[in-house]
Amino acid sequence: MASLLGSGVYFWQGNEACAYGAIAAGCRFFAAYPITPSSEIAERLARLLPLVDGIFIQMEDELASINAVIGASWAGAKAMTATSGPGFSLMQESIGYAFMTETPCVIVNVQRVGPSTGQATKAAQGDVMQARWGTHGDYVPIVLSPNSVQEMFQLTVRAFNLAEKYRTPVILLVDEIVGHMREKIEVPPIKEICIVNRKKPKKGDRSFFAWAEVAPMPTLGEGFNVSVTGSTHDEYGVRFTADPEVHRRLISNLVDKIEKHRNDIVELEAWNTDDCSTAIICFGCTSRAVYEAVEEARRKGVNVGYVRLKTLWPFPAETIRRLAQRVEKIVVPEMNLRQLFYEVERAAYGMAEVTAVNKIGGGQIITPEEILEEILS
Amino acid sequence: MAKRIEVRIAGLGGQGVVLAGQILGRAAVYDGKSVVQTQSYGAEARGSAAKSEVIISDNKIAFPMVRKCDILVAMSQQALDKYISDLKGNGILLVDTLIKKIPETEAKLFKVPATKTAEKTLGNKLYANVVMLGALIKETRITSLEAMEKAIRESVPEKVREANLNAFKEGLKLG
């Protein structure tokens, strides 16, 4: 393991960094169906996993992939799948099953242009709302958004840690640009990487679900009598397919276990937001243009700051609300037609003007000049 | 060397322009620089437009895409026609000699017989990308020779390692 993941400086693609991050986090099971622009994650893990006695399976499709991942997680493994929009759509039903059964796992979606087949090799940020609301019913997902190769490594590790800590699926929402670009990356010594493992039950425990805090998770085959079901169930896994009270308790506990720990889950990168007149809210590859736009705006004497969402969901509405009280204008650049924008507008509650910079198709990243133009307008 | 150099290598899918960008980027990392390399290609395996972009800087690189490039390496007529307008006036242009129509340009022009050399000397035109890298480094020195050789060694499969190193050496004679 140490020799496989020697600390040091590398020149990696974002997708490669994701694969190594998964290995570092303890991922020992990966099932996926190859799809551009995520395939390099599978390609790399196909080589790495056998070296750590892990399992790599190329499944027949994305439905089978996510189901294999859920099964592996219940068999005790840290498990991951990787896909892009079309595959992410196919996985939605079972992602809901993972929420309902409190199954820790990591789902990587390297976004490309959609809907449908769209433009397979081109970047987009069009799955922001699908990551939030893709499966049916009420739930709160954890969605992380990296903006560099270094962060592809770090946030993959973090995705596993949050999945294990809160016993929930975690989505790593990448875009083609971050997934495919190569950068210098510094891999820390393996001993310095924080690893979280799921809470296990004690002998004689019988309650494994729907706790207000996170319930312990048995591994199938260890002798615990556990029934895992996507139907509404009580603390013991017993199905209640009509009882309103059991359903309310289950769902509110599943929602609360995330909501109550927002401070632990939500990570932001904020710069100059205390006294700026214009603020930019951004995520993923688009933030790389924001850095330059902000510098240029300040050279022109405009006081600009930014908030970058490393955690997209849960959405930091309170942070945005407080920001909206201070600034005159909030700019939301994104490679889609206003997905994060409406969330920001809702949180700003009319206290600041919220404007959008949008671009779709062809993988064209929003440029610093386009953001600057909106800042100055 | 300036603080920030933006390189665009463009051609057709299958010519190895993406690999050329990776090798160049990896070499610059070995030289201790900040590097971002990106690529763009079609859904087809071969024949569609492909490009690879490398930004090399002494400082942290924010925006990862090339807009106006300092160096353009064109491996096909289509690529040259498409990207020459984005080359800076004082930039450097390397074109494969297979390209016949070269528009008027203020940039410093080098006609490199990369494909011809790859076919004649190395017996396979697939080495044209690495021959071109040799010419690029000879004319610009944007990375050290040692870093390039190390990057080539670590970027290609073992059975074609020597051939690629030879291709690089042939390229160093051109330009």
Image (cartoon, coloured by chain):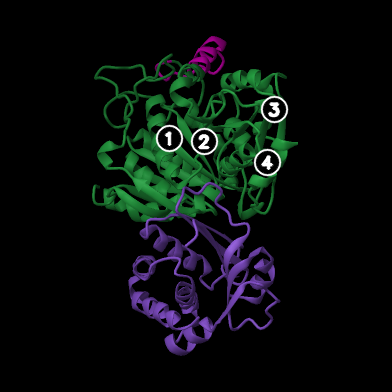
Colour for chain B in the figure: purple
Residue B20 at what x, y percent from top left?
Answer: 48, 68
* Disc 3 with disc 1 on a shared chain: yes
Element under disc 4: helix
- Looking at the rendered structure, which numbered label has been put on residue A94? 2
The residue drawn where x is 55% and y is 51% is B64
Residue B142 at what x, y percent from top left?
Answer: 45, 66
Q: Which residues are magenta?
A: A235-253
What's the amino acid at mark 4?
Leu
* Disc 4 with disc 2 on a shared chain: yes
- Looking at the rendered structure, which numbered label has been put on residue A329? 3
Element under disc 1: helix
Mark 3–mark 1 CB contact (< 8 Å)? no
Q: Which residue is mark 4?
A: A372
Q: Which residue is mark 1?
A: A159
Residue A240 at what x, y percent from top left?
Answer: 51, 16
Give the mark nearest the N terminus, 4 or 3. 3
Q: Write down the quadrant of residue B93 in the picture.
A: bottom right
